[in-house]
Amino acid sequence: GSTIGILGGGQLGRMLALAAANMGYRIHIFAPEAELPAGDVAAQVTRAAFDDFDALDAFAGQIDVATFEFENIDVASVRHLATKVAVQPGAAALEIAQDRLSEKAFVHELGGATAPYRAVDSLPELVMALDALGTPALLKTRRMGYDGKGQVRINADSEAEAAWAAIGGQSCILEGFVQFDGEFSVLLARGQDGDTRVYDVPHNRHDGGILATSQVPAPADIAAHAPEAMALARRVAERLDYVGLLTLEFFATENGPVFNEMAPRVHNSGHWTIEGARVSQFENHIRAVCGLPLGNPALTAPSVRMTNLLGDAVHDWATLLADPNAHLHLYGKSEVKTGRKMGHVTWL
Ligand code: ATP
Ligand code: MG
Ligand code: MG
C-alpha cells in the first residue's frame, strides 16, 4: 500500500495513475488546475500552486515517493519537495530540460548534434544571430514552450522585429532550420539500479507544431538513426543518474540524428506503448520510480500507430471503434479548445 505522489494532473498523470493502480499503488495528484484529467482516477488530490511550500510539505507527509508529469514546475519547488521525500527523476534533469539552451549545451557536451543555435535576449542579438545562422530559422522561448507554442519561424531578416515582438521579449534561442527526412523519439526507461530499457523508436509526424501521429516501426530510413540516438539517450540518462522514463526527440537528417529536445517524463510519442508494447512507458516509469525491475519494451504487434484526438476535430467513436484493432483513450477533459489534446487512438 505505497502512495506515489505526482506533480501535475494532466493526461500523462492520468495514464501513470492507471498503470500504478494496476500494481496496487495509490496515487496522490498535486496540481493547481480546476480540471484535472489525472484527478478522476487518483485516490487523492491536492489542489495547490506548485510554489505553495506548506502544501508541498503536507503532500510530502502523505506519500512514499514523488514524480512529475509536467516539466514546467519551478525547480525550487521540486528541490524543496526532495528535502522531504524522494523525487524521481531528480531536480537536475528537470532543470536542464526546462531550458532549451542548457539542454542543447548538455547534449553537445555528450557528443550529440543539435541545430545550430544562439542565445537571444534582445532584438540586436536576434539580428546578429540571424546574420550568423541565416534563414529560415526558428525563434523559440528558452522556457515554457510546448506544442509549438512560444516559437516563431523567421523566413527573412526583415521579419526579425515582428518575431521579437511576437515572443514578447522573453529569453530566447534562435535555431537554424533543420532539413530533416523525418522525426523520431527515443523513449528510455532507467531503473534505480542503472538498468535501462529502450522502446523501438516511433516515427512522429507533427501538424502545426503539435504531435499528430506516431508510427512503429519507423520507416527504415528513419529507424537507421535509432542506434546512434539511443546511445546518446543512454549517455544523457547516465550522466543525470536518471530514474524513470526519459524522452529525447530527434530529427533524422542526412548527417545523422540531430537532437531537438528532451522531456524528463513520459511522452505523447510513447502513448502507443500502452497496447503496443509488452510493458508500457507508464508502467516502466512507475516501476523505476518504485525501485522495481523494468519490463519488456518489445512490440506486441507488427505495426502500431497512435493518432492524437485534438479539440477541434469531430470524431465518431463508433466509426473509430468499428476497427476491432483500435483502442480509444479519452482524457475526460470537458473544455474543448483548438489543438487541445482530448484523447488518442492506437491501432495495432
Ligand atoms: P513539444 O510539444 O514536443 O514539447 P515544443 O513546443 O517544445 O513541442 P519543438 O519540439 O521544439 O516544440 O518544436 C515543435 C516542432 O517544430 C518539432 O517537432 C519540429 O517539427 C519543428 N521544429 C522545431 N525546431 C525545428 C528546427 N530547428 N528545424 C526544423 N524544424 C523544427
Ligand atoms: Mg517541448
Ligand atoms: Mg518537441
Image: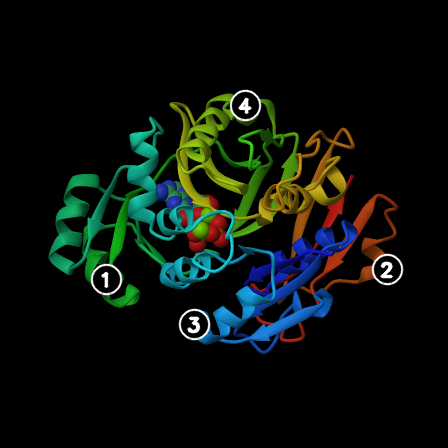
On the image, the x and y values in percent for residue 225 come to 49, 24
Q: Amino acid at mark 3?
A: Phe
Comparing labels 3 and 1, the label whose residue is closer to the camera: 3
Q: CA distance from mark 3 to mark 4?
A: 49 Å
Which quadrant, please, contains the C terminus?
top right
Which image quarter: residue 193? Answer: top right
Please tell me how crowded label 2 is: few (under 14), some (14-19), or many (20+) other residues with Cα within 10 Å. Answer: few
Residue denoted by label 2: 318
Q: CA distance from mark 3 to mark 1?
A: 35 Å
Residue at the bottom extreme of this rendering: 34
Residue denoted by label 3: 53
Please tell me which residue is depicted at 59% across the width and 60% down the height of the picture.
Answer: 5
Query: Which is nearer the N-term, disc 2 or disc 4?
Result: 4
Residue denoted by label 4: 221
Q: Is residue 97 left or right of residue 34?
A: left
Please tell me which residue is depicted at 45% across the width and 56% down the height of the picture.
Answer: 82
Q: Could you say which is closer to the camera, residue 172 or residue 208?
A: 172
Residue denoted by label 1: 164
Please tell me how crowded label 4 is: few (under 14), some (14-19), or many (20+) other residues with Cα within 10 Å. Answer: few
On the image, the x and y values in percent for residue 201 come to 59, 32
Query: Which is nearer the N-term, disc 3 or disc 4?
Result: 3
